[in-house]
Amino acid sequence: MSVQSSTNEGPLGTRNIVLSGVLLAVALILSLTRLGYFPVPFPTQESTILHIPGIIGAVLGGPVVGLIVSLVFAFDAYTRFVGAYTWPNAVAPILTLFVSRLLIPIVAWLVYRALHKSNELVALGVAGAAGSLTNTAAVVGFAIAFGVLTVDVIPVILPAVMFELVLSAVVTVAVVAAYKRLSVGRTRSSV
């Protein structure tokens, strides 16, 4: 067994540790500078891209890398929004703001894994969109289930949801395709 293959084995091999570190740095920069949240002309007034590093981590390194990177978004969302709403109990904000963010990379990885053999670029786009939709569906779903929000919020957030979904799909395809040097359009990769 070569040194290279032995350092890259398992979910926390050398490659995945480096990948986690780089994506953690990106997520931290987005979180600490607030560049991960930006104004949009929708009733929600802002959208986020903080879920995208976790999606990319899951697609490139598997669910463990995605979960590690998504912890930044989970902690950021919890600390940012826990005081913004009245919660019925102590479990509600943990599930709504923290745990829901950890579902993003798992769903993205499962979708990518199911589709990547048929068409890599489609799999990346659908994984990015599914991860983004998981974020919104889990957060809004838990918030409605706990009575923090009502179902009439759904039509109000739909424009922002669609915007984040498309943005997540495009960025995931662009970043991962560039990383993997995939065939895009007419050019072919040597990988």
Image (cartoon, rainbow, N blue to C red):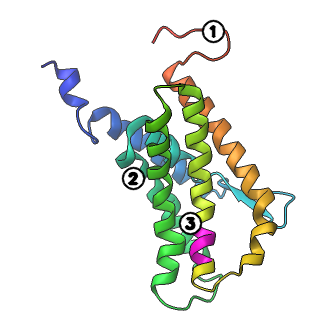
Q: Quadrant of the C terminus?
A: top left
Image point (46%, 48%), residue name: 24
| Mark identifier at residue 138 | 3
Which quadrant would the N terminus be assigned to in this image? top left
What residue range appears in magenta?
A: 139-143
Which label's residue is closer to the chain start, 2 or 1? 2
Name the amino acid, label 1. Answer: Thr
Residue farthest bottom in this picture: 88
Q: Secondary structure at mark 3?
A: helix
Residue 187 is marked as 1
Q: Is residue 49 above or below residue 183?
A: below
Q: Main secondary structure of the magenta part?
A: helix
- Circle 2 residue: 68
Location of residue 61 (image quadrant) = top left
Q: How many marks?
A: 3
Where on the picture, by quarter, is residue 167? top right
